[in-house]
Image (tube, rainbow, N blue to C red):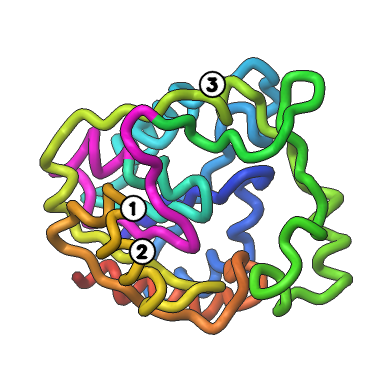
Amino acid sequence: MDIVLIAGLWLDGSAWDDVLPELEKLGHRGIPLTLPGQGDGATAATYDDQAGAVVAAVDAAEGRPLVVGHSAACTLAWVAADRRPDAVTGAVLIGGFPSTEGDAYADFFEPVDGAMPFPGWEKFEGPDSDDMSEELKTDLLGTMIPVPVGVTRGTVHWTSEARHDVPLTLVCPEFSPAEAKEWIEAGDVPELSAANKLELVDIDSGHWPMFTQPAALAALLDEATRR
């Protein structure tokens, strides 16, 4: 099966390099996206540009692909379910949640010169990054790409109630399925509270399992293709 892979903020398609061969072993073709403004050299990209790129990737895939989003890009994976509910096998969200209707996409840190740079590993100390070596952190720091404010401050809108019937898998890395369930039941994540086919799965990793647990992550994605 084709699996569309969307990395989170500051990362391009190369974030999935260690996952791709693991998916291939399991019989799948990974399609890693380098989003507008996040690795393609564009500086004036918008959230709508990124959402459009995800939909285009779904349209270009063979059959009904699985769409995977990491961190903030969980919103972009859910865009595929919203705009192409009958064209996707399902959506997988890794370590994040879809934004609520009307919210900004990812306005988390102050921009510099029109883009939001990676704020440094100090902001992610603890469970987010405890499983990452200092060497890995240093290597990744050199690849982080500031994200244009047109992306981070774009407004999220949902269009189709049919998205709630798309099979949805939430991969829980630095938080547990039990914690996620509490947040969902409390109404803190409206999009997941409304999901009719939601499954919570655990992975023993921090926030970036594509780097620290690529084989285990690929196995979970393989399972999601059969839901």
Q: Is residue 19 visible?
A: yes
Q: Residue at x 80, y 59 (%)?
A: 121
Q: Earlier in the sequence, mark 1 or mark 3?
A: 3
Estimate how packed mark 1 is, as few (under 14), some (14 to 19) or many (20 or more) residues with alpha carbons within 10 Å.
some
Could you tell me residue 52's position as x and y percent? Answer: 40, 26
The CA span between labels 2 and 3 is 29 Å
Secondary structure beneath disc 3?
loop
Q: Which one is closest to the eye, mark 2 or mark 3?
A: 2
Residue lying at the far front of the rendered structure: 186
Q: Which residue is mark 1?
A: 189
* Structural crowding at the residue carrying mark 2, measured as other residues with C-alpha within 10 Å and reported as few (<14), some (14–19) or many (≥20): some
The residue wearing badge 2 is 183
For the residue labelled by badge 2, is the local secondary structure a helix, a strand or a loop? helix
Q: Position of residue 57 (x, y in %)?
A: 39, 38
What residue appears at the point 88 percent right and 61 percent down from the top-left corner? 138
Which of the two residues, 153 or 212, is positioned nearer the viewer here? 153
Which residue corresponds to mark 3? Answer: 46
**Residues drawn in magenta:** 79-102
- Can you say whether 218 is above or below 151 in the image? below
Quick one: 68 or 199, which is closer to the camera? Answer: 199
Cα distance in 3D space between marks 1 and 3: 24 Å
Label 3 crowd (10 A; few <14 / some 14-19 / many >=20) = many
The answer to whether the residues at label 2 and label 1 have Cβ atoms under 8 Å apart is yes
